[in-house]
Amino acid sequence: MIYLDNAATTRLDDEVLAAMLPYLKNEYGNSQSQHALGRAAAEALVCARDEMAARLGCDSGELYFVSGGTEAGNSALKGVCLARGKGHILVSAIEHPSVIQSAKDMGKLGFEVEFIMPDSRGVILPESVRRAIRDDTVFCAVMAANNETGVIQPVREIGEICKSRGVFYYADCVQAVCTQEIKADFCDGLGISAHKFYGPKGAGALYIKSGNGISPLISGGRQEKGLRGGTVNVAAVVGMAAAFKKICQNKAVYNQSVAQIRDYFVNRALTEIEGTHLNGGGEVLPTHANLSFDGCAGEILLVALDLNGVAVSTGSACSAGATEPSHVLTAMGLPVERVRSAVRFSFGRHNVIKEAEAAFEILKTAVNKIRGKCALPIGN
């Protein structure tokens, strides 16, 4: 299998697994327990929190462990809104489905929700945010980089605008953190998810700037300073911290390598497959390529590639199975035919150039077969 769906999830790093194993077998205590095993687990959480906070440039007390990006976004948006009681919410129209749905949930409770549209490149312009903020705006969400197109957003400028108006600014950094230098100083809250940077699934981190009181989303015990009840998955958190340390130390080399493979694949697709379009413009993550192919339904192309051993997606993994076209590409104003023919190729540190070469040849054959231009068989 040639795996080109790293935006959906990444393969667990061997060193990360090794760091997790002691807390899955021998050091299995509950971090809330007062005995030796419990204290060992608690100490592991302290070390993991300190390690990650230092790299994010925030205080350890501002970092909370959650299950991933979906919970982080839900917790930030709903937590801020419930603490404020009423007001106006701004959310970009290209946000992850979890943030968009969270905003709609708050709309049912009386909050006024407004969606900010991107330009044709898929960029949320700071001026659009500035114009949309009102005196009663309590929350704004614009992600650091889009999960479907990889388009990087001007989050520092947006953060400054929100700060000047006293609006809580949340940045979904789930896709960006693997390749971009992320520091928490530009926002009031951000979320990351371990399985996007070669860590375990089911582990994430939520930063909330000190002084921003938010209501807990998950009630229960006093874990995570009362913000998130439930026994902490110590092994997963340890793995997340180990994965985060590794990606932070190797970003320059990793980015150059993955960008070369991605660019090779994209350039061949654009020049050798007629009717190919690259979706998204401006600055894009080195891992992402969202391509549309005239005359090819994205879902059909995905199946054809899968049958020939290439794993891709047609959008966010959290939207898989949805019948509606991509809300991201639609918000960018692309024609519906181009939206429905889009496929996301996302590259990672385990990919090599030979895989890109083989994947392209399979892609070219599949596109021609779907268009009726090739008699070669698809699948076994």
Image (spheres, grey):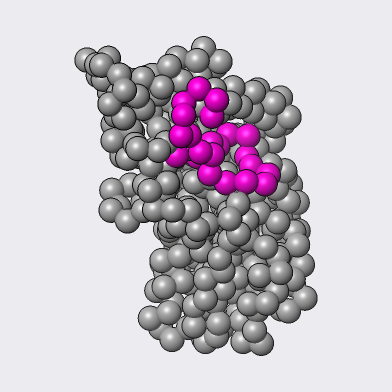
Along the viewing direction, whichever of 232 and 107 lies nearer the viewer: 107
> As drawn, is 270 to the left or to the right of 231?
right
Asked if one can make out residue 102 in the rendered structure from this viewpoint, the answer is yes
- In depth, the one of 23 and 315 nearer the eye is 315
9 lies left or right of 366: right
- Percent coordinates x, y for residue 114 in the rendering: 52, 76
- The foreground one among 309 and 229 is 309
Q: Is residue 277 magenta?
A: yes
Percent x, y of residue 205: 56, 52
Query: In which quadrant of the rendered view does residue 366 lie?
Result: top left
Please, which residue is most extreme toward the left here?
380
Q: Looking at the picture, does residue 311 appear above or below residue 222?
A: above
Instruction: Determine the residue positioned at 41% across, 22% down.
Output: 364
Q: Which residue is rendered at x = 41% and y = 49% of the image? A: 339
Query: Quick check: 144 above or below 100?
Result: above
Task: Specify whether 353 is left or right of 303.
Answer: right
Image coords of residue 278 (percent x, y): 54, 39
In the picture, the quarter occupied by the N terminus is top left
Q: Which residues are magenta?
A: 270-292
